[in-house]
Image (cartoon, grey):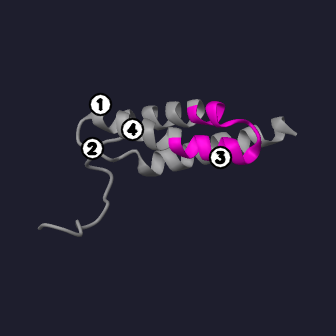
Amino acid sequence: MKRKLTLPLIAGCALAALSLSGCGYSPGSRALSGGAIGAGAGAIIGAATGLGPGTGALIGGGVGAIGGAATNPNTVNLGRPLVGN
């Protein structure tokens, strides 16, 4: 049963990490924020699927860090800020 849930876990972590990995201006800050967001999402998904929160956090954190470092802040448009300009 665990093997059937591994692919959806990886896909879910990758989707969450890539969609949220554009937080920050430098590649290092995007890698850190993407890794943290991916680790959190991976831990939740891993615990829910029976793979384990530690394994899910490792997978999600890795995917998030790579996604964050690989993105460009100019290609991610999060819209107008709610506060400020």
Q: Give residue 60's position: percent from left, percent from top.
A: 55, 37
**Three-letter amino acid code of the residue under disc 3:** Ile
Q: Does residue 69 appear to the left or right of 43 in the view shown?
A: left
The disc label shown at residue 24, or none: 2
Is 79 situated above or below 13? below
Q: Earlier in the sequence, mark 1 or mark 3?
A: 1
**Quadrant assignment, res 51:** top right
**Three-letter amino acid code of the residue under disc 4:** Gly
Q: Is residue 14 magenta?
A: no
The magenta-colored residue range is 40-57
Quadrant where the N terminus lies?
Answer: top right
Are discs 1 and 2 less than 8 Å apart at CB?
yes
Q: Residues within 10 Å of mark 4 (few under 14, many from 20)?
A: many
Q: CA distance from mark 1 to mark 4?
A: 8 Å
Q: Which-is-in-front pick, marks 3 and 2?
A: 3
Dot 1 lies on which element? helix
Residue in view at x 77 percent, y 41 percent: 50
Q: Earlier in the sequence, mark 3 or mark 2?
A: 2
Q: Residues within 10 Å of mark 1 (few under 14, many from 20)?
A: some
Residue under circle 1?
A: 28
Q: Does residue 10 appear to the left or right of 65 in the view shown?
A: right
